[in-house]
Amino acid sequence: MEEPTGRLTQKKVAIVGGGLVGALNACYFAKRGFDVEVFETREDIRQAKVVKGRSINLALSHRGRQALKHVGMEDKIVSQGIPMHARMIHSPSGKQSPIPYGKKGQFILSVDRANLNKELLTEAETYPNMKMNFDHKLKDWSPETGLMTFTRLDGSHDQIQADLIVACDGAFSAIRKQFLRRSRFNYSQTYIPHGYMELTMPPVNGEFAMKPNYLHIWPRNTFMMIALPNLDKTFTCTLFMPFDEFEKITTEDEVMEFFQEYFPDTIPLIGVDALKRDYFRLPGQAMVSIKCSPYHIGDKCVLMGDAAHAVVPFYGQGMNAGFEDCIVFDEIMEQLNEDFSAVLPEYTRVRVPDDHAIADLAMYNYIEMRAHVNSKWFLFRKHLDNFLHFFLPNTIVPLYTMVTFTRTRYHKAVDRWQWQDKVINRGLLFGATGAVLGGSYLLIKNPPDINKLIIPTEKMWARLMSFWTS
C-alpha cells in the first residue's frame, strides 16, 4: 500500500459493489486520497461459509496485470495463479494438439475468482481513508445530489451523500436503472442461446489429471467444454451448450451417452458417479452481453465493469476489461487534475468504443473456440500470422496478441486486425495466382506424360477435398 496523496478538501467517493472491479477501484481512489466507502449487498465473502455468485474461472492477462501492478498487487496475485501457455485441443478420438497463445514465454493465468476478490478487499482495507459496508442494498439514489439510501438486513436504512458515485454493481446494476430513465441513454442486452454448466475434475493420486499449464478445449462445433487448472490440483470444467441441448438430457443414462459420444476421454477423469450427480445439480446458466452509452451522468456518477459492459466469457477479457476501466479512469484523472466534470465525459468518450469492441470480439471468439479450431485453414492462418509476426513484429501482430498481451485499445486492435486480414488474404491470393500461372507456363513448355499423373491427381484431389471440408 502507498500513502494516499493529500488534498485540501477530501471529496467522498462511494463505490457501489464490492466485487472484483469495486474492490480494485477502492484501492485506486483511496490511493489518490479520496474519502472512500464501498457498499456491497452481500455479506463479507471473507467470512462467508458459502460464497454465492458466479464461479467461472478467470483468465488474468496483461491488461488486468497492469491494473493490479498500479496498486502493488500484481506479484501477489500472479503467485497465486497457474500459467497457461497454450490451448490444448482435444479431438473426439482423444488426440491432443496444443495451439500456443503467443510467443515463447507469453501466457495467461488461471486465477480463482473468490480468492482474488478476498485479496483485493483485504488490500483496500489497508488504506486508512477507506471504509467497507457489507449487507447494504441500494434502494434509491439521486443523480443531482449524490444522496443514496441503502437497506440493511434488519430493515433499517442508511443514507449517505457522495461527491462521486462509482457503479461497480454488475450486469444487473441497480445504479444503472436511473440511467435508463434519462433521455439519450443507449442500452442493449443480448442473451446468447447457449448456457454453461460447471463440473469438477479431481486430482489423480494427488496430481493434476491432465497437463496443468494449458487451457483445455473440447470443441464440438455447436458446443464445447473447457477446463482450467486450480491450485488444489483440480480442474474446473465448463460445458457451454445451447439450452435446447441441455434440456434434451433428462436422465443419468442420457448424460453418460452424451459424454461417451462427445467427451469420452473425460469420463474416467471426472468420474461416472460425479458426472451423473453434478450434471443435474444446477441447470444451465445464462450468459448476457450488455452495451450502453454514455457511462456517466454529469459529474456525479460513472459506470464501470459489468455495470457498463457485461461480456460473454469467450475472450477471457471480462475481468481484464473491468480492471482496465480502473486504470484508464485513473490516467484520465491524472490528465485532468481530478476534475470530475471533465473526467467523466472524457472517460465515456475514450472507453465506450473499446468496451463495445471487446463485447463483439467475445461473441466472435465463441465461434472460433467451438468450431474454427477444428479447421485446418484456421490452424494454417494461426501459424502464418505467428510466422509473419516473428519476421515483421511491428507490422503484423495477431489479434489475440494485441488483445491479450498488450494494452492496445480494443477498437484499434480490431481495426488493425481487419486491415492485416485484408493484406494477408490478398497476399495469399496473389501468391496462389502466381503459382497457378507459373505452373501452367511450365506445363505448357514441358507437357508431362498424362498416364503417369492419373493416380497422383486423384490422390491430390481427395486430399484437397478433405482439407477444405474439415
Image (cartoon, helix red, strand yellow):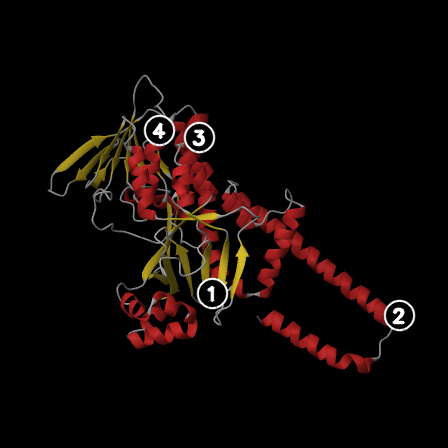
| Residue under numbered circle 4 | 1
Query: Which residue is painted at 59% across and 46% down in the image?
Result: 416
Rendered position, 343 above or below 272: above
In the figure, residue 336 lies in which quadrant? Answer: top left
- Mark 3 or 4: in front is 4
Callouts 1 and 3 close, C-beta under 8 Å: no
Q: Where does the image place residue 375, in percent across and percent down from the top left? A: 56, 65
Mark 1, residues whose alpha carbon is within 10 Å: few (<14), some, or many (≥20)? Answer: many
- Dot 4 falls on a residue whose secondary structure is loop
Mark 3, residues whose alpha carbon is within 10 Å: few (<14), some, or many (≥20)? Answer: some
**Hey, what amino acid is under mark 1?**
Pro
| Residue under numbered circle 2 | 445
Query: Which residue is painted at 38% across and 39% down in the image?
Result: 295
**Hey, what amino acid is under mark 3?**
Ile
Q: What is the CA distance from the residue labelled 2 to the residue labelled 3? A: 67 Å
Q: Quadrant of the C terminus?
A: bottom right
- Mark 2 or 3: in front is 2
Image position of 318 (left or right of 153): right
